[in-house]
Amino acid sequence: MKQTSGPARKPAEAVIKDIRRATRRQFSAEEKIRIVLEGLRGEDSIAELCRREGIASSMYYGWSKEFLEAGKKRLAGDTARAATADEVKELRREAGALKEVVADLVLENRLLKKSMSGAGGDEA
């Protein structure tokens, strides 16, 4: 008699890949900066730093390059940056309020022009 196993299993490689993907660590900007600055201090080798932090050396060098490029741009006077969600909301609210003011002024201007032309004044 042939014995049947439970549901079909994934290959071991796929299971390991899923586990690694689910447990991948996300580093905050502050953590990345801390790690890059530690590397720049040179107290430990980059390889030792990467082992201690649990990152690949290629990841460290990528972060280091981004960090130094951002510093270079800032020192060159490039202050452009992405706006935060709160800043975008505030700017949209301000733009809406300004549009209302412009609409009110346009309406008032039209009414004044009509009253001028009705009173025998020169038309603009």
Image (cartoon, rainbow, N blue to C red):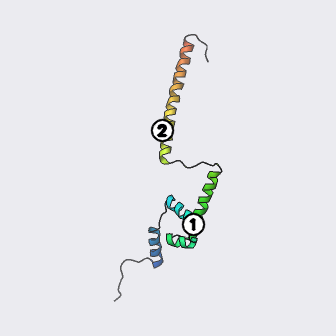
Q: Amino acid at mark 1?
A: Gly
**Residue 58 or residue 16, whichever sits in front:** 58
The residue drawn where x is 55% and y is 10% is: 119
Secondary structure at badge 1 equals: helix
* Residue 33, image x, y percentages: 54, 60
Residue in view at x 59 percent, y 63 percent: 64
Answer above or below: position of 123 versus 71: above
Indicate the amino acid at tag 2.
Arg
Residue 106 at x, y percent in the picture: 54, 25
- The residues tagged by marks 1 and 2 sit, at their Cα atoms, a distance apart of 44 Å
- Front one among 86 and 68: 68
Q: Which residue is mark 1?
A: 39
Pointer 2: what residue? 93
Q: Position of residue 3 (x, y in %)?
A: 35, 86
Q: Quadrant of the N terminus?
A: bottom left
Residue 2 lies, in percent from the top left, at 35, 87
Mark 1 or 2: in front is 1
Q: Residue at x 44, y 69 (%)?
A: 23
Where is the C terminus found, in terms of image quarters?
Answer: top right
On the rendered structure, is 73 left or right of 20? right
In the rendering, which numbered label is found on residue 8? none
Circle nearer the N terminus (1, 2): 1
Spot the residue most to the top.
120
Secondary structure found at label 2: helix
Q: Residue furthest front?
A: 43
